[in-house]
Image: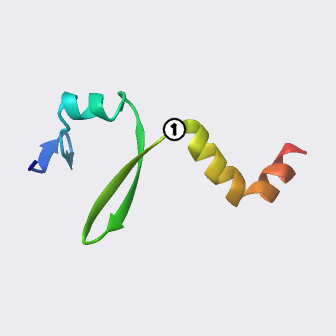
Amino acid sequence: MRKRLMKIGNSQGIILDKPILDLLKIKENTSFEVTHKDNGLFLKPISVSEAYKKVSKKHRSSLDKLAK
């Protein structure tokens, strides 16, 4: 499948077709982690709980201090 980068407001983006979103169970407002992989981009949907776990693990001591 080929997609073209297009202007969306003041930005640029790629529109993903609904059947692809349905197949991957991606809902509106899903956040993605974007990484560079093999001369391309890799998009990984992330949930709020995944994001929290990642931040919590990295910044546990700071979060503990803020809680006091």
Provide the residue designation for mark 1: 47
- Above or below for 31 versus 2: above
Seen as rendered, the residue at the extreme right is 68
- Above or below for 27 versus 51: above
**Residue at the (64%, 52%) spot, across then down:** 55
**Percent x, y for residue 63?**
78, 50
Task: Looking at the picture, tell me which residue is in the foreground, 10 or 61.
Answer: 61
Q: How is the image coloured?
A: rainbow
Q: Is residue 57 left or right of residue 35?
A: right
- Above or below for 42 versus 19: below
Three-letter code for the amino acid on which mark 1 is drawn: Ser
**Residue at the (20%, 46%) spot, across then down:** 13
Q: Is residue 4 left or right of residue 25?
A: left
**If the image is split into quadrants, where does the C terminus sit?**
top right
**Percent x, y for residue 40?**
25, 65
Q: Residues within 10 Å of mark 1 (few under 14, many from 20)?
A: few
Seen as rendered, the residue at the extreme bottom is 39
Q: Label 1's element?
A: loop
**Residue at the (20%, 29%) spot, across then down:** 19
Task: Looking at the picture, tell me which residue is in the foreground, 64 or 45.
Answer: 45
**Residue at the (19%, 39%) spot, across then down:** 9
Task: Looking at the picture, tell me which residue is in the foreground, 24 or 41.
Answer: 24
Task: Looking at the picture, tell me which residue is in the foreground, 10 or 12.
Answer: 12
Q: Is residue 1 left or right of residue 46?
A: left
**Percent x, y for residue 30?**
41, 35
Mark count: 1
